[in-house]
Amino acid sequence: MQFDFTQNVRGDVLIVDDTPDNLRVLSMLLTRQGYGVRKALDGAMALASAQAAPPDLILLDIKMPKIDGYEVCQQLRDSPKTSKIPVIFISALDDVADKVKAFDAGGVDYITKPFQAAEVLARVENQLRLRRLQQYLMLQNEELARSNRELEQFASVVSHDLQQPLQSIIGFAKLVRLRYQGNLDDKLRSYITSIEEAGERMQKLTRDLLLYAKAGNQVTLNETVDCQRVLKQVALNLHEAIATRQATLTYDPLPTIKGNEMQLVQLFQNLISNAIKFVRPGVSPQVRVSVEQVEEGWQFGIHDNGIGIPPEHRTRIFEMFQRVDREDQQYSGNGIGLATCKKIVENHGGRIWAESQDGVGTTFHFIIKADPSEFF
Ligand code: ADP
């Protein structure tokens, strides 16, 4: 991206004033400083000129016949082509009410007549610098969004295409184990187990990556989602883990909210499966889901009696591939689940955070906006 906002690019300024003398003075002042200057003697001319080729800045007189400055500014704001052009009002009306009205109409600054040359130049340059910075940030945002989309597409294609060969590797390893069961010595059997385990880890990694990439897709956020039903679905999906770990899952009466049901199932499922997983050996996981209404929307809590999260990791764990290093490394995983949760919550206009007490348990809180579709 080429955009040097520090360079001294003089802008293109449109001056609008029905007094030819004022036009001449301002025009001379700006031309001498190297600005490109266009002039308009009334509102209609100004609007036509701005539509034909949007300038970088408009200096706009307020008191003009037919269409006054406020009305011109309003019309500029209403048109997508001219809505972002900064407008500095110029007027002899040195009255607070007029200044407020000028800002209400969409002006960014105000100069009173008789004006000082140095003040006009400082205000013009200030607005042009802001505009250049704004344009630079917009370009950078577009660039970031584009490269993010590309990365997600890449992750999605790679994860998808890896599924099939991985399935074959695991399938053939299983076949060898079954076919040659009697003829395998311990070493060979452990090799085959390693192939199967590595294959399954990779399969989980590619599936989770795919889910992460999908969480960034544009989805409808105004489905009516019964959270009670969502929790039932999650309990069903996690049935095996719940039974094996002898876990208890309880929840408050849960509301019906606006959101994307598939993503909300994913969100609760990731958090609850972690709550079941990160528990000391021999302890039965106790997981409770709470909910309360707060100013921003619905605040959910997933409480567990697990191993806890050290304070220095409580923010980092929401980043991709971040896990808490533990000496025994007995908890499997890839560090994608919470990054996916964060993406889903942010899609819903909310935020997510963790509170934890070492050895006592952790609560993951997240807020879902009352109506996330209004968020954008
Ligand atoms: P994974 O579970 O695959 O490692 P996550 O992104 O879901 O990845 O979680 C990141 C890390 O956050 C985990 O590795 C774990 O260290 C920590 N963590 C997440 N949930 C809990 C929890 N309920 N209790 C303790 N630690 C947790």
Image (spheres, rainbow, N blue to C red):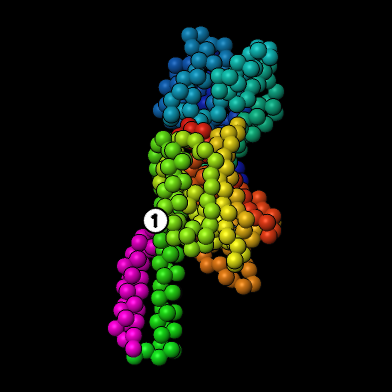
Image coordinates for residue 119, horizontal then vertical, percent: 69, 27
Pick the front one: 117 or 283: 283
Tag 1: Cα neighbours inside 10 Å, few (<14), some, or many (≥20)?
some
Image coordinates for residue 321, horizontal then vertical, percent: 54, 62
Pick the front one: 357 or 213: 357
When the figure is inspected, residue 39 is found, relative to residue 222, above or below; the finding is above
Q: Which residues are magenta?
A: 155-182
Image coordinates for residue 349, horizontal then vertical, percent: 52, 39
Asked which quadrant contains residue 350, the reply is: top right
Left or right side of 37 for 260: left
Q: Is residue 103 visible?
A: yes
- Determine which residue is flagged by label 1: 153
Q: Is residue 168 magenta?
A: yes
Which residue is painted at 45% across and 64% down in the image? 205
Which residue is painted at 44% across and 60% down in the image? 240
Asked which quadrant contains residue 34, the reply is: top right
When the figure is inspected, residue 127 is found, relative to residue 116, above or below; the finding is below
Q: Amino acid at mark 1?
A: Gln
The secondary structure that most of the magenta stretch takes on is helix
Q: Is the residue indicated by label 1 positioned so its CB lies within 8 Å of ligand 1?
A: no
Asked which quadrant contains residue 123, the reply is: top right
When the figure is inspected, residue 325 is found, relative to residue 130, above or below; the finding is below
Which residue is painted at 59% across and 67% down in the image? 281
Left or right side of 172 for 25: right
Q: Is residue 278 magenta?
A: no
Which residue is painted at 60% across and 31% down in the image? 295
When the figure is inspected, residue 290 is found, relative to residue 196, above or below; the finding is above
Pick the front one: 157 or 21: 157
Image coordinates for residue 247, horizontal then vertical, percent: 53, 57
Pick the front one: 20 or 14: 14
